[in-house]
Amino acid sequence: MPRASNHYNVVVIGSGASGSALAARLSEDPQKSVLVLEAGRHYGGIESHPPALKYCHSGAFAMPGSADHWPFMAQLTGDRVISVARGKTVGGSSAVNGAFYGRGAPADYDGWAAAGNVGWSYEDVLPFFIKAETDLDFGDSPGHGAQGPMVIQRRPESAAVPIIDAFRQACFGAGFPEDLDINSATSAGVAFTPTNASNGRRMNAALRYLIPVEGRPNLTVQDRTFVHAVTFTNGRADGVVYQRDGVDGAVSADEIVLCAGGINTPHLLMLSGVGPADKLQQLGINVVHDSPYVGQNLMDHPFVGIPYRTTTEGPVPGGLLPVGPVILNYTATDSSITDDMCLLPAIYSKSTMLFGARSQSLVDRARGALFLRNPWATWKGVWGGSAKAALQDFRQRKDLQMFVELSVELSRGELTLTSADPSVLPQLSFRYMSEPEDLRRMRDGVRLVARLLEHPAYRRIGAQLTTLTDGELSSDGELDRWILANLASAAHTAGTCKMGPITDATAVVDPRGRVHGVEGLRVADLSIMPTLTRRGPHASAIMIGERMAALIAEESS
């Protein structure tokens, strides 16, 4: 389709789960030119991906020195600061996540609709979940899809792995029911996790949505492009300025859609002059629109990993199963929030996740272990430069972990701009456990894990806690200190550009993703979530891309 090389109908910033789905769907209209700008690299097909991105059990992408993640640091509590890596490659964070594909609960979306977000109830979004998926287990059942880009399956054969069988039996013994389909409207209990992995490989959103349609003449995917700001004329977004391989560039567009995620999207909005006016002015940024809640309402899924050891490790099909092929979703004791917790037993040790599985070639394991490139950076980044911490990790290298996660967090954090320089990362304050009920429920979950490990099925494989003591388990105060010292982030950052009607003073975008107070600019990613969905947000991010594409097409018709 003839067009000026520097003007597009739509510019999509970010090629993660939402951006890949959105761009692929928008480009189905041959009259609509679409440009995708991605800060990271474009590796092409899955076999061209480096091992750290290719294998779904791998966490090596987050090692210091990797070019494939944003090295965000987050203050979780008053004195606990950790790395929260987000994907920086075509595919975004869907290229580095655990390949878990949970939809969330109907109550999540019905809560959005009840808050004034018309068109976002469970009934409204279900067709887009269906459109997105090919469910190899339930594709012929109501409420599931069999023709979508994302291929999903569960791994019931993992029940033969001793630690997974022990987890299932212990949960059943504690009275939790079996859940055959975590993506059903009535899901609860112990389930095999639906994943978008194939033979142990992460089949990220770009591999399923974007890369297969790159041949379309109206679709352009431009990698290694670091966007500095959205430009405005008379309150209307009309272009983007960026740097690519050290060279400044710019494009103009009829409409710009931010799909850069729960951290980069609000950061870019503020750099562009949309945010809290007083703070922007202090940094010398020209204010386009005073939007004080940009960067507020920061949500995540906090978790702790409880280390334990068994006398048997397998058989674990090396690298072929996801990190957590089974999960327990449940309601915490005395909680007023249904389905607010989950337990996930990891089947790989930390050393396997960082440095590769035995089934991988030595070359792949060496390439994945980025510490070979910069041992000092790894020591500083992973162990804080502490020989004691590194030694403790080495001693616990064979430990497994049971993850206790808050599926519904009550605490809220914030993202703040610290510089007008786009290369300076924003400050992240998660404020975990600032609501006492969050800490109480987390404490309840840790004690549940201890009880489950006492089940005969776990006793048969010699399971025992390795660092958490009986004294810590029996004392609320000591257990609270242990939890606060071991908190980690699921990196499910969301909510920082909250969606809501114009009557909601805390909303940044309207229910069609349009940024309040300006024209020509939308947001379509996890940052619009009024509340974070249960069960991991990957499928929800893809649904948001599908939903926004339909809304844009509706407006264009």
Image (spheres, rainbow, N blue to C red):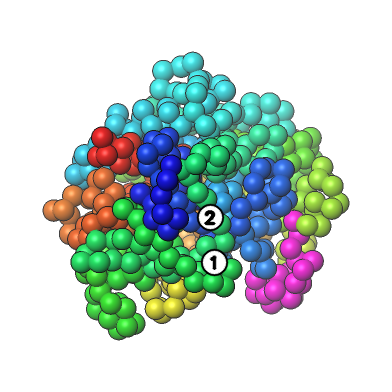
Label for residue 244? 1
Amino acid on which disc 2 is placed: Gln
Secondary structure of the residue carrying tag 1 is: strand
Q: CA distance from mark 1 to mark 2?
A: 9 Å
Q: Residue furthest front?
A: 2
CB within 8 Å, label 1 to label 2? yes
Q: Main secondary structure of the magenta part?
A: helix
To which residue does mark 2 refer? 222
Q: Is residue 17 left or right of residue 546?
A: right
In the image, residue 120 sits, relative to residue 479, either above or below, namely above
Residue reaching furthest to the right: 362
Residue 338 higher or lower than 284, as above or below: above
Magenta residue check for 375: yes
Instruction: Please state if 292 lies on the left or on the right of 456 as rendered.
Output: left
251 versus 216 height, above or below: below
Q: Position of residue 22 (x, y in %)?
A: 42, 43
Res 307 seen here: no
Q: Quick one: label 1, few (<14), some, or many (20+) residues within 10 Å? A: some
Tell me the magenta residue range: 368-390
Q: Earlier in the sequence, mark 1 or mark 2?
A: 2
In this rendering, is residue 9 above or below 149? below
Disc number placed over residue 297 in the picture, else none: none
Q: Is residue 237 left or right of residue 45?
A: left
